[in-house]
Amino acid sequence: MFGVLGVLGLTLVQPTDTQGFLSRDWAPATGELWSTMAMLAIFLTVGSIWTALAYQNAPPALISPLDFTYVGFALIWSWMFYAELPNAGAAVGIVLIVCAGILAVSGGVRPTPTGRA
């Protein structure tokens, strides 16, 4: 729904910046771009299959925090390709995700027995 509204909004408002991502003229895809898209499609498919297998073969409480490791990779790629570093809020979120992964792998906090039989 919101995507449709966004597209309609872009057609109604003519951006003045012609170099923007959404307002540029169409450019045909080159062979290099097609090969990059094919490689990314293969990696995404394999990663999705492995994630599904992990959820089938391990406790979801263990897999879920580790499923968010893409955030760390996004940080590395944004630094490598765009020289961008996370702001304070993003850094805190990344640290919390890493802590959740460590807690899940280590077995987490176990409740103490109450002594009732």
Image (tube, rainbow, N blue to C red):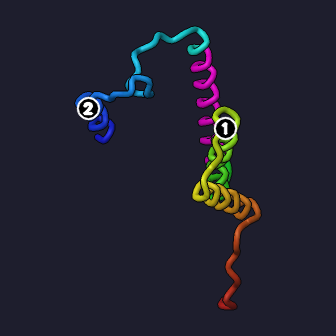
Q: Residue 59, can we see it? A: no
Give the alpha-carbon distance from disc 2 to disc 1, as whole Å: 32 Å
Q: Which residues are magenta?
A: 35-55
Q: Quadrant of the N terminus?
A: top left
Residue 72 in view in this figure = yes
Spot occupied by residue 43 in the image (x, y as percentages of width and height): 64, 28
How far across and how far down the image is residue 100, in percent? 66, 61
From the viewer's side, name the closer residue of 43 and 37: 37
Q: What is the x, y in percent for residue 77?
A: 67, 37
> Mark 2 — residue?
13
Q: Earlier in the sequence, mark 2 or mark 1?
A: 2
7 shown above or below 65? above
Q: Residue at x 56, y 14 (%)?
A: 34
- Nearest to the observer: residue 49 or residue 93: 93
Question: Hey, what amino acid is under mark 1?
Answer: Ala
Relative side of 16 to 87, left or right: left
Q: Is residue 20 left or right of residue 38?
A: left
Mark 1 is surrounded, within 10 Å at the Cα level, by few (under 14), some (14 to 19) or many (20 or more) other residues, namely few
User: Which amino acid does the dot numbered 2 rest on?
Assistant: Val
Q: Which residue is mark 1?
A: 83
User: Please, what secondary structure does the residue beneath circle 2 have?
Assistant: loop
Q: Which label sits on residue 98?
A: none
Q: Residue at x 60, y 53 (%)?
A: 87
